[in-house]
């Protein structure tokens, strides 16, 4: 049972190949730029290393957000078309859950969403959601987190929040989702957690 | 020679499209999913919304294409994709999709320039005769291109500012016409008289165009007339604007045909659907013994059929891309 893990939602490109839930190969690096020119070549490289062809993959796990809008779409375009083509199982994973896999205990993964806002959530030890994923003001999130003893995890730096740098645990995530039923490639869409500015303006005009 | 089936994807602006073309000229099947109704709410294409709709629709479009054309991926010789120019976020969806298909099916990937696509839409109508001059007119482009043979592009002139379609849309907005404005201007101009004095834009010896001046002239005119409390004769203004634009396009195209001693003219891009431009070019070509080819309306707007048609010649020339291919917002035609 081979699986491919794809996360293009931040500046960190993560590609992993697993066999029965055990890591065979992983690429996890911060890219200077160009998610698009890197993602597929790395997938090819990791499959080649393990003497696998695209059709050998049984499950594709793909991070569908929140995070960089463009970045998310790069991974999703690859995963959707790949799964559509080889007719294999496709499982969406949250970028916040990926961050949460880094540490033991209660975790508050956060992603900078600019203008003092973040995407955040709270997860327990077993990667179950304790507080729903939301796009919100940093301060609102800190207030929510006050009742928990959480570790903040992020790739980004914040003035008012002390965070640890993620050491993601792909095996833990894949184990958690191994029995997920998967999603039809046509139905898989990004989880932006945020409208576009144009949509927000149009909506506020109508209110 | 064995038949070549190319499956192409085009997503450079607000149409998600996929198509299969046989031997560069025979359309097997095409799917175009237009987002125009959505963007009309915003008075123009919103790039982030366009990208979002592309990713929602990409596999649906591919699925429908295979059903429609009664082919499987095993029948496909190579994949092609528009890598630029266009909206980066939009381009990337089609690009990653095409690269993934190329990888998964282990078949060649052909990068296609969007304008080369527009030009080769003509091959779907009639085999292009060389040498030729191509007049490319769309919402993003206004170019005169000289081609001495297949896939040899020499850009001899282009717009220095707004593309012609862009100027149409902006003028339409000032006149209070719905988006997209180009076809609206074309429609109401037929009801007007050419009664407004507007300058002939960049009426010089080059092959370049400039439409920001005439656009500003229209905007100022509307503004001043409103301040004076005068009513705008919208139909008249639409015709006056259109007459100047079509006149300079026709004039410079003829100059290029003469200078390069060429008897073949092809027209490409969304504005090729404009009735005034079509009839003006037809008249000019008739008077000067020029063979004119203008694609059917369905091939004038953005579609993947033209990308697949163009890719066939790139394929024969051995042009290939690997999985590192990236999208380019701006890129010279070559």
Image: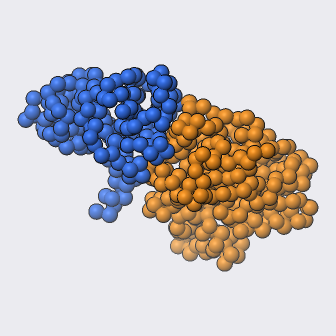
Chain colours: A blue, B orange
Relative horizontal placement of residue B149, taking residue B305 as reference (left or right): right
Between A142 and B306, the one lying in front of the other is B306
User: Residue A80's quadrant in the figure?
Assistant: top left
- Camera sees residue B80: no
Residue B291 picture location, percent across and down: 87, 59
- Camera sees residue A86: yes
Quadrant position of the C terminus of chain B in the picture = top right
Q: Is residue B320 above or below residue A134?
A: above
Residue drawn 58% across and 47% down?
Answer: B73
Between B207 and B30, the one lying in front of the other is B30
Residue drawn 89% across and 59% down?
Answer: B290
Residue B272 picture location, percent across and down: 70, 60
Residue B30 picture location, percent across and down: 61, 58
User: Residue A9's quadrant in the figure?
Assistant: top left
Relative horizontal placement of residue B147, taking residue B161 as reference (left or right): right
Between A174 and B158, the one lying in front of the other is A174
């Amino acid at each position: 049972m081979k699986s491919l893990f794809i996360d293009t939602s931040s500046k960190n490109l993560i590609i992993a190949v697993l066999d029965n839930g055990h890591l065979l190969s992983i690429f996890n690096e911060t890219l200077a730029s160009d998610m698009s020119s890197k993602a597929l070549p790395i997938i090819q490289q990791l499959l080649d290393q393990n003497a696998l062809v695209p059709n050998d993959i049984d499950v594709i796990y793909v991070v569908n957000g929140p995070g960089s809008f463009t970045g998310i779409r790069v991974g999703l375009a690859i995963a959707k078309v790949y799964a559509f083509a080889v007719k294999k199982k496709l499982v969406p994973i949250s970028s916040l859950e990926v961050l949460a896999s880094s540490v033991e205990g209660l975790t508050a993964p956060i992603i900078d969403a600019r203008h003092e806002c973040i995407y955040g959530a709270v997860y327990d030890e077993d990667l179950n959601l304790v507080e729903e994923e939301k796009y919100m003001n940093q301060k609102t999130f800190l207030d929510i987190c006050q009742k928990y003893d959480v570790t903040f995890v992020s790739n980004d730096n914040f003035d008012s929040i002390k965070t640890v740098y993620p050491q993601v645990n792909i095996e833990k995530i894949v184990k958690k989702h191994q029995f997920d039923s998967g999603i039809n490639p046509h139905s898989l869409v990004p989880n932006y957690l945020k409208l576009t500015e144009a949509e927000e303006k149009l909506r506020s005009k109508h209110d | 020679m064995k038949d070549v089936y190319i499956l192409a994807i085009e997503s450079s602006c607000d149409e998600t499209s996929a198509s299969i073309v046989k031997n560069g000229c025979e359309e097997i099947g095409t799917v175009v999913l237009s987002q125009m109704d959505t963007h009309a709410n915003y008075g123009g294409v919103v790039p982030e919304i366009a990208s979002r709709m592309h990713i929602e629709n990409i596999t649906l479009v591919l699925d429908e294409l295979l059903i429609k054309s009664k082919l499987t991926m095993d029948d496909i010789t190579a994949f092609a994709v528009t890598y630029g120019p266009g909206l980066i976020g939009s381009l990337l969806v089609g690009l990653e999709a095409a690269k993934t298909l190329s990888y998964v099916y282990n078949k060649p990937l052909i990068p296609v320039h969007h304008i080369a696509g527009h030009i080769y839409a003509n091959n779907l109508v009639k085999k292009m005769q060389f040498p030729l001059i191509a007049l490319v007119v769309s919402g993003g482009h206004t170019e005169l291109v000289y081609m001495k043979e297949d896939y040899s592009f020499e850009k001899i002139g282009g717009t220095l500012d707004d593309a012609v379609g862009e100027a149409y849309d902006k003028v339409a907005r000032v006149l209070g016409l719905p988006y997209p404005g180009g076809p609206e201007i074309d429609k109401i101009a037929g009801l007007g008289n050419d009664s407004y004095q507007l300058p002939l834009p960049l009426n010089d010896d080059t092959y370049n165009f400039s439409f920001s001046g005439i656009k500003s002239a229209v905007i100022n005119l509307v503004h001043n007339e409103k301040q004076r409390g005068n009513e705008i004769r919208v139909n008249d203004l639409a015709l006056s604007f259109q007459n100047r634009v079509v006149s300079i396009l026709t004039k410079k195209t003829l100059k290029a045909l003469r200078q390069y001693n060429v008897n073949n003219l092809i027209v490409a891009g969304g504005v090729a659907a404009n009735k005034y431009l079509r009839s003006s070019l037809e008249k000019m070509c008739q008077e000067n013994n020029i063979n004119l080819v203008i694609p059917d309306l369905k091939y004038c707007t953005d579609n993947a059929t033209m990308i697949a048609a163009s890719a066939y010649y790139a394929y024969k020339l051995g042009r290939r891309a690997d999985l590192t291919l990236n999208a380019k917002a701006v890129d010279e035609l070559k």
